[in-house]
Amino acid sequence: MSNNAQKTPLAQSLNRFAERKWNDAFQLLGKALPCSVVSVSGAIVTVKFELISKFTLPTVTIPMIGPEYVRYPIKAGDAGLVFPADARLSGVSGIGGGVADLSMPANLTALVFMPCSRNDWSTESATAVTIYGPDGAILKTTNSSSKVVISPSGIAMTTTGSATIDASGIGLKGGSGAQRGVVQGNCVCAFTGAPHPQISASVTATI
């Protein structure tokens, strides 16, 4: 049986064999790639990859990086990155089931999404935490017994307990007309016809 064992040096053949094996194994590893959001379902996103490739990469449905207690208002079109894990995330994310093992996952299955900042975002204070979203923001307890909702139409504060404001001065400002329920120095007593003598020095209202 003829072969080229005497024509091709053994060291060169072994190097090529090792390179092919390494390349094959590398292709199985997960990749950190740029992407954008296609759709959002709760804390799970479906993303498409934003890169030019000779391969047609499918959209993937994956979890986002972040805790339960801070929800990001991710929407379709938002840009970000996917990062690979060394084991399947279907169990911890709730997308699938079971417990992960140390078998190598497919290269597009153990990914998480992380948003990426852009230079066209609005300019805010560099020394303060800024929280906002297209429809505002919600601050609440787990069971919603106390909640603050900031929306384009206003601010709503609700609680099943008590609300306390402790400050050296409290100012209330509303629309035109008298603010019912707030007694000011220019409020006239219904009995004496004179301004109320007992008013709050620390709580004022702008009318």
Image (spheres, grey):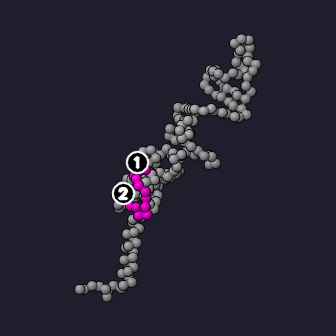
Using a 10 Å C-alpha cutoff, classify the residue at mark 1 as few (fewer than 14 neighbours), some (14 to 19) or many (20 or more): some
Residue 126 position within the rendered picture, expressed as x and y whole percent measured from the top left: 62, 48
Residues 16 and 65: in front is: 65
Confirm whether residue 33 shows in the render.
no
**Which residue extends farthest left?**
1
Using a 10 Å C-alpha cutoff, classify the residue at mark 2 as few (fewer than 14 neighbours), some (14 to 19) or many (20 or more): few
Q: At 69% across and 34% down in the image, what residue appears?
A: 166
Residues 99 and 108: in front is: 99
Residues 24 and 158: in front is: 158
Quadrant hosting residue 106? bottom left
Using the numbered discs, state the Cα–Cα distance from disc 1 to disc 2 in whole angstroms: 14 Å
Q: At 52% across and 41% down in the image, what residue appears?
A: 133
Position of residue 11 relative to residue 155, above or below, is: below
Q: Earlier in the sequence, mark 1 or mark 2?
A: 1
Q: Quadrant of the C terminus?
A: top right
**Which residue extends farthest front?**
98
Q: Which mark is residue 57?
A: 2
Q: At 66% across and 26% down in the image, what residue appears?
A: 206
Q: Is-magenta flag for residue 177?
A: no
Q: Which residues are magenta?
A: 94-107
Residue 48 position within the rendered picture, expressed as x and y whole percent measured from the top left: 40, 52
Q: Quadrant of the N terminus?
A: bottom left
Residues 22 and 163: in front is: 163
Q: At 69% across and 27% down in the image, what residue appears?
A: 204
Quadrant hosting residue 54? bottom left
Q: Is-magenta flag for residue 106?
A: yes
The residue labelled by disc 1 is: 38
Residue 120 position within the rendered picture, expressed as x and y whole percent measured from the top left: 52, 48
